[in-house]
Image (cartoon, rainbow, N blue to C red):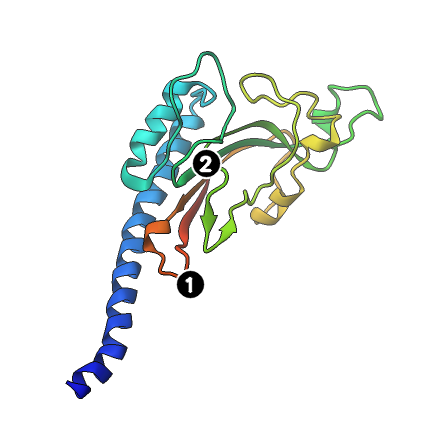
């Protein structure tokens, strides 16, 4: 009995670690696939500010806990106050060079030489936590002036439309007026936490 008790002190944590790691691996594979699927649909012009596309994303996420609430009329590009364990952030960005700036009067192109948001949509639960820390978009969490579809207004002249963090995420600078779609998915795993060790989560990011 004594030998078993001593051995169990090492085996039980090992079994728990093996279980948690295996579950995280399964969820990581699912989360990566969800990120790719949502991005593939997004870059083809699907308007994710509508409820039906958000609901489809929730269905694609399966048991990962992405909730988008009940149906809403019209558009909602910031449907991020739901419950659940998932959060999706969609960003359409463009590099602003001289050609892009030709669309506004000389001297008014505040964001020349920077990446700017053309659209930003997020849905799910923006308050989820990984290991006790609230998650954040790697691209940024700007205060943007948008229309009902999440399209950013005055992206050439409004300094709030700039995405300075994005330059750190790409290996080479985009060409003038080149557009990129970024999809970020966050799925927390509170059910895999133990007392003083809160559950972590899975973060996935794709460029299209």
The residue furthest front is: 1
* Of residues 37 and 125, the one drawn nearer to the viewer in this rendering: 125
The percent position of residue 12, horizontal first and vertical second, equals 24, 72
**Quadrant of the snapshot with the N terminus:** bottom left
Residue positioned 48% across, 54% down in the render: 132
Relative height, residue 65 to residue 5 (above, below):
above
Residue positioned 52% across, 23% down in the render: 77
Q: Is residue 193 visible?
A: yes
The percent position of residue 112, horizontal first and vertical second, equals 74, 33
Name the quadrant containing residue 107.
Answer: top right
Residue positioned 40% across, 47% down in the render: 188
Q: Is residue 208 visible?
A: no
Choose mark 1 or mark 2, whichever is in front: 1
Position of 207 with respect to 15 (left or right) is: right
Q: Secondary structure at mark 1?
A: loop
Determine the CA span between mark 1 and mark 2.
23 Å
> Dot 2 surroundings within 10 Å: few (below 14), some, or many (20 or more)?
many
In the picture, the disc for residue 196 is 1
In the picture, the disc for residue 125 is 2
* Of residues 158 and 63, the one drawn nearer to the viewer in this rendering: 63
The percent position of residue 119, horizontal first and vertical second, equals 57, 26
The residue furthest right is: 107
Name the quadrant containing residue 173.
Answer: top right
* Of residues 167 and 48, the one drawn nearer to the viewer in this rendering: 48
The percent position of residue 103, horizontal first and vertical second, equals 73, 19
Position of 60 with respect to 109 (left or right) is: left
State which tag comes first along the sequence, 1 or 2. 2
């Amino acid at each position: 009995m004594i030998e078993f008790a001593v051995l169990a002190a090492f085996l039980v944590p090992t079994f728990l670690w093996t279980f948690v790691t295996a579950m995280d691996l399964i969820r990581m594979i699912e989360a990566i696939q969800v990120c790719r699927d949502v991005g593939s649909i997004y870059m083809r012009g699907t308007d994710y500010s509508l409820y039906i596309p958000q609901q489809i994303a929730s269905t694609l996420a399966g048991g990962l806990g992405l909730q988008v609430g009940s149906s809403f009329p019209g558009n909602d590009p910031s449907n991020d106050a739901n419950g659940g364990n998932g959060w999706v952030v969609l960003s359409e960005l463009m590099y602003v060079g001289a050609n892009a700036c030709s669309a506004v009067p000389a001297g008014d192109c505040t964001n020349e030489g920077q990446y700017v948001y053309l659209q930003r949509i997020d849905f799910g639960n923006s308050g989820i936590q990984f290991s006790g820390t609230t998650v954040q978009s790697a691209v940024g969490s700007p205060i943007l002036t948008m229309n009902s579809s999440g399209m950013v207004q005055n992206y050439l002249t409004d300094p709030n439309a700039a995405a300075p963090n994005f330059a750190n995420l790409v290996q080479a600078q985009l060409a003038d007026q080149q557009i990129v779609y970024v999809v970020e998915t966050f799925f927390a795993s509170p059910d895999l936490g133990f007392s003083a060790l809160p559950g972590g989560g899975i973060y996935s990011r794709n460029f299209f």
